[in-house]
Amino acid sequence: MIPLGYLIAKAFDVEGTALVENLFRWRNAKLFLNTLLLTVGVLIVDILLATPAAWLTTHADLRGKRVFSVLCALPLAIPGYVMALALLGLGGNNGIFAALFGKSLPRLSGYWGALIALSFYTSPYLFLNLRTALLGLDPSLEESARSLGYRQWGVFIRVVLPQLRPAFYAAGLLICLHVLGDFGVVSLMRYETFSYALYIEYNMAFNHNYAAWLALVLLAFTGCLLYLETRLLSKVALHRAGHGTSRHRTLIPLREWKSIGYLYLSLLFITTVMIPAATVFIWMFREFEVSALGGLLEALIGSVSVAVPSAVGCAVLAVPFTYVGVRYSSRFSNTLARIPYIVYAIPPLAFALSIIFFIGSRGTIIVLICACILHFLAEAIGPVRSPLYQASPHLEEAARSLGCSPFQAFFRTLFPLLTRGMLIATALVFLATMKELPLTFLLRPPEYETLAVNVWDYTNEAMFAQAAPYAFVILLFSALFVRILIRKEEV
Amino acid sequence: MFKKRPILFNYFLFALLSFVLIGTLHAETITLYSGRSKSLVDPIIQQFEKETGIEVKVSYANTTQLAAKLLTEGRKSPASLFWAQDAGALGAVSAEKLFEKLPKSILNKVPKTFRHDDGYWIATSGRARVLAYSPERVKMEALPESVFDLTQPKWRGKVGWAPLNASFQAFVTAMRAQVGEERAEKWLRDMKANGAKAYPKNTPIIEALAAGEIDLGLPNHYYLFRFKKRDSKYPVEQTFFKAKDVGNIVNVAGIGLLKSSDNKKTALKLVEFLLSTKAQQYFVSEVFEYPVTEGVIPNANLLPLEELLKIVPKFDLNEMDDLEGTIKLLRRAGIM
């Protein structure tokens, strides 16, 4: 609420005529249209990329599903601008492709460049959300559908997909907000979106009053999306109606399609993770310097000491928010449950400045962690919400009737069902915090270093060889952390 | 469990005491907001700490973000010094009267070109604007002589610039001061009409030149050296426009002492150090920047300061801090 008040206070501090001149420009309308086109494009590509991957790693009888799950989540650990730089570095006369094969690829740019880079690195949001939902599905519904004569495809489209709606919406919202806020990728690809206008206001002008207006436009748009989402979810009930608990799922044999399944997952990994990772590798070995490794450990400790508490904090805090939204659905609770998305949509720079404005800037790590938790809470909502939709309210009712207090009932019956979602939520927020920049820049105490800050600092000065080890450690460490969480999840 | 507690408590006390001790040994600390990258300036700050025993706590971030942070914090800022990448940000902080006047003894260390008349901040090093080109596609003799020639039809769609970059904007500020608003606006409009490609900053311009996306670009002078250091055959070269052309403007990084500082004397020691021959030599040799004081051995890749001063246009730092006017102009011209 405080940042919102800050924005509004700033917004009312402007002259009317100048405002109209700056806000209602033809150019802003064009930027907005560009943003919409890009958002829709990214959503479509993400659905096409992530849905098969999520299904293959949960319901099909492939081997190494956990490894593939980690790999599919990894693009999230790659900062957007690094993804863009890697894709840009492939093409052109001096590109990596030309160096390897002697023939230059056309260089990506504009709409398609932005679309590809953004889809690659936002696809894990959808993948992880879908994965949680798919793992929690009750197989008996699918079995009944099959017994009624539907084929596998029919079952997927008519029975499985509709049950994934909460996951699709949650991930879709995050992806939309990401595309709306992204400047790193679109500026490198030279595709102008609404974030250009915001970037200019926040990074060129020192008076942020117009910036506040633009941010409010963005928030209004987010509000519309949230309203739409609430309406779409208002009558959804996805839990079992029958008695007992759901059975263990038998995996669907792919038979002759198996190799295609492996091929698909491998190709996805190669394009979304290997390309950027290989680029970083090449940066490192074109000009390797041992001295560049000096600050690595300090930066790693810095990153982890914020990312872990933030991730855990978000996963825990997401439970009450989703719980009231799902169980006690009313206009008020639905609004309350969606506040995290509004916070998420506030430009991080404005968010950080409002914190500085209210509590001063003797920055401590605690302040930074709190800011990260508030900002990233939205990312934790989706994975926690899916299992809540799948859990029957009768569970708690039964526990209450056996004499449990409401809290006991919650912790004994529902909480165990939520752990899978909470682990995935932790993974999502961890990956996001590991590469966080604007909040860290403004709120960190002096001398506090993170991996992401170093990657940004060195690439910004065109010292790619020095940036590479930091980017690598982000990637490795993220993979490790997600691997641990995914192992825990299936026990 | 109960027996262990007192021991733990003792450890805790010991740790606390040692912190206090270390704290008193390092009594002299200054907080610096640095808009200059850690990768560029950390070595020289460490050198300063080693020589003086003064501890410098640095908050690194983007120059504009730090300026915004300072404006939000006002007089309560924990910072003593603000070291910025460009004059525009210093101008904005100075306009809010957050800077203390610098003493004459410090101001007199640099030539008049490199200081503000008010004396609220001082330049620490210079970065020239240059013309970068692809030697494969443009011959030396075909290069444009002036930045105003870039609007000719033969360069249609072949020029890269970075209108969102602070260095570019400083160049536009200089252009406004030299040729007037109207001519500057016409140049911007003509450039846009001529299909100039907008990159987010300097490095992507150089990469786009190498990739064959553009033939000419308008970056700062020192980025190319980093590419050349890695790969001496990197297919991009750079040069100046003809002498005194506004395209050859030199931007400065500069530093100012904040009123909020609680130990101004100590803070000034860092300012003095940055203007010392040792620090200036570091900027020239390691960061490939131009010095602001005399007596520095020139970098073989760079022009000596006197030579540079011959080809740069006449410019006045007093006029360089009007970033707001430049942004208005860029808006009007439809560039952003």
Image: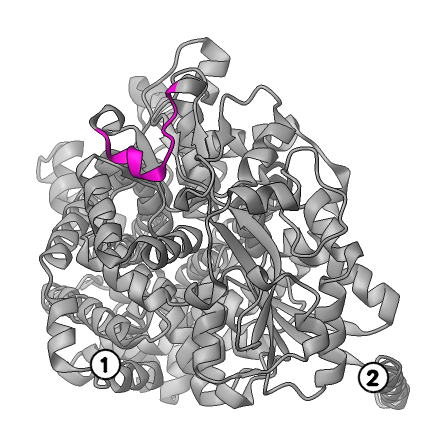
Q: Residue at x 76, y 38 (%)?
A: A290
> How many other residues sit within 10 Å of disc 2, few (<14), some (14-19) or many (≥20)?
few
**SS for dot 1:** helix
Q: Nearer the viewer, residue A313 or A100?
A: A100
Q: Chain of mark 2?
A: B
Question: Could you tell me which quadrant the N terminus of chain A lies in?
Answer: bottom left
Q: In the rendered image, which residue does mark 2 sit on?
A: B27
Left or right? Give the position of A108 relative to A303.
left
Q: Residue at x 63, y 37 (%)?
A: B302
**SS for dot 2:** loop
Tell me the amino acid under the disc marked 1: Ala
Q: What is the quadrant of residue A144 in the picture? A: top left
> How many other residues sit within 10 Å of disc 1, few (<14), some (14-19) or many (≥20)?
many
Left or right? Give the position of B262 relative to A380.
right
Q: Nearer the viewer, residue A233 or A213?
A: A213
Q: In the rendered image, which residue does mark 1 sit on?
A: A11
User: How many marks do you count on the picture?
Assistant: 2
Q: Chain of mark 1?
A: A
Image coords of residue B253 (percent x, y): 56, 59
Q: Which mark is residue A240?
A: none
Image coords of residue B317 (percent x, y): 49, 64
Tell me the amino acid under the disc marked 2: Ala
Q: Which residues are magenta?
A: B142-152
Q: What is the quadrant of residue A136 in the picture? A: bottom left
Image coords of residue A201 (percent x, y): 30, 66
| Residue B308 on the magenta segment | no
Would you place residue B168 above or below residue B23 in this image? above
